[in-house]
Image: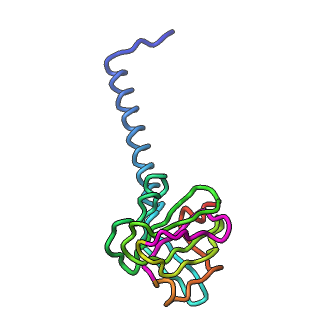
Amino acid sequence: MIASSTPTTTLLMHILRSAIAAVAAFMLLTFSVLADDGQLTIANAKGDYKFNVEVVDTNESRAQGLMFRTSMAPDAGMLFDFKESRQVSFWMQNTLIPLDMLFIRHDGTIANIQVNAKPMDPTSIPSDGPVEFVLEIAGGRSVEPGIKAGDTVLHDRVNKQ
């Protein structure tokens, strides 16, 4: 026997589909909130240092970076995600504030650091070998806590193994 569709059956099917869609949307929202791209920690012998970061992971957003910004909080930063390990090079053209650039390998270790990159300088600043990420923070900020090559970066994107 083939069941015929009644108005009540149609209504129940619509409600069921809506409920499933609502649960799926709720779960998606919940998991996106739990994956906090905004918090990054650098761990070294002196302790853990937390930064609130903006993540840039498209060609357009990486090209814009921190250009034309006039200030940066001491606990702020921008994490460039290249989505693959490769040799990268940065410059300070159109960047108005000094920055520290931390070049980070796929495994989260810092490969090299450029301290106090000079504003508006077109000189190329390369990574020491392939990296997947670069963290830009306020100029000189890496010096006080003694952040150095070999220290570990903790972030949802960096430690995604």
18 in relation to 131, above or below = above
Please give the count of numbered marks on the rendered protein.
0
122 in relation to 113, above or below = above
Quadrant where the C terminus lies? bottom right
Outermost residue toward the right in this view:
129
Colouring mode (rainbow / by chain / secondary structure / one colour): rainbow
Provide residue 48's location: percent of width, then percent of height: 53, 83
74 in relation to 157, above or below = below
Indicate whether residue 2 is drawn in magenta: no
Outermost residue toward the front in this view:
122
Provide residue 51's location: percent of width, then percent of height: 45, 75
| Left or right, residue 63 beside residue 109 | left
The residue shown at (52%, 81%) is: 115
Q: Which of 28 and 134 is in front in this view?
A: 134
Q: Quadrant of residue 78?
A: bottom left
Q: What stretch is highlighted in magenta?
A: 121-139
The residue shown at (36%, 72%) is: 96
Provide residue 61's location: percent of width, then percent of height: 43, 56
| Left or right, residue 69 beside residue 125 | left
The residue shown at (51%, 88%) is: 143
Q: Which of 85 and 155 is in front in this view?
A: 85
Q: Which of 59 and 2 is in front in this view?
A: 59
Provide residue 40's location: percent of width, then percent of height: 49, 72
Q: Quadrant of residue 24?
A: top left
| Left or right, residue 11 beside residue 79 | left
Q: In which quarter of the image is residue 38?
A: bottom left
